[in-house]
Amino acid sequence: KNQVEQSPQSLIILEGKNCTLQCNYTVSPFSNLRWYKQDTGRGPVSLTIMTFSENTKSNGRYTATLDADTKQSSLHITASQLSDSASYICVVVRGPGGATNKLIFGTGTLLAVQP
Amino acid sequence: EAGVAQSPRYKIIEKRQSVAFWCNPISGHATLYWYQQILGQGPKLLIQFQNNGVVDDSQLPKDRFSAERLKGVDSTLKIQPAKLEDSAVYLCASSLDRRITGDGYTFGSGTRLTVV
């Protein structure tokens, strides 16, 4: 079954600290993996997009990793800020890339950064 | 470029009433998606359009939900009659095409619906 599981479900950290969010998937065939940030009441905003051959990709203080062999991804946030408080959603795009592909969503990790 | 526009941002209705949401995708995006996101869950695809044709509506509750994209540009999602369990954020997204391989896949800010 095509699934995306995220952990932890929620996380509280102090401002300035680092944290790592996990994503495990069983989606096949795999096209690409995306991490989104979703502020409360807003639509998801893309942070990174990773293809099968990419191991690491950074976007400012956000660094995503992908291990296609174990079907695991992580999102590392460095020097957290209050504005990082949001839900982080892992999404795997299922499909060969040449036809209609489908997004498989995780349920998200709710991050709260406290002063 | 302008993003995906949605309106209204918020809507509160009583059960059994009707409601409609509007979405204007990014210019040139052929594919348009409507999602339902219940609090604490990931978005669930309701319907996908390619230009003005339906590609996937397998998870659309067709007894009460309908959607159209008549001219292949903007789209409307309707619920009639609404139930309490329809309370959710309704997200619209658009992409250049159906392959979703690049960064041309964009979500709107959503419409938060509360059914009382």
Image: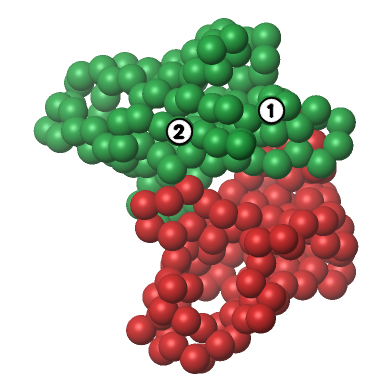
**Badge 1: few (under 14), some or many (20 or more) residues near its Cα, within 10 Å?**
some
- Point out residue B113 in the picture as x, y percentages from the top left corner: 45, 72
Q: Secondary structure at mark 2?
A: strand
Amino acid type of the residue that numbered disc 2 sits on in the rendered structure: Glu
Q: On the picture, is B74 further left or further right than B77? A: right
- Residue at image position (69%, 56%) is B33
Residue at far left of view? A115
Between A43 and B114, the one lying in front of the other is B114
Colour representing chain A: green
Residue A5 bears which disc, if any? 2
Q: Is residue B45 above or below residue B22?
A: above
**Secondary structure beneath label 1:** loop
Quadrant of res A27:
top right
Please state, as top left, top right, bottom left or bottom right, where the C terminus of chain B lies in the image.
Answer: bottom left
How far across and down, in percent of the image, does residue A4 sit?
51, 34
Residue B48 vs residue A74: left or right? right
Disc 2: which chain?
A: A
* Residue occupied by mark 1: A28
Q: Position of residue B41 (x, y in %)?
A: 43, 51
What residue is shown at x 74% (from left), y 62% (from top)? B57
Q: Nearer the viewer, residue B62 or A13?
A: B62
Q: Of the residues under marks 1 and 2, which one precedes in the sequence? A: 2
Q: Residue at the front extreme?
A: A1
Question: Quadrant location of the N terminus of chain B?
Answer: top right
Q: Which residue type does callout 1 highlight?
A: Ser
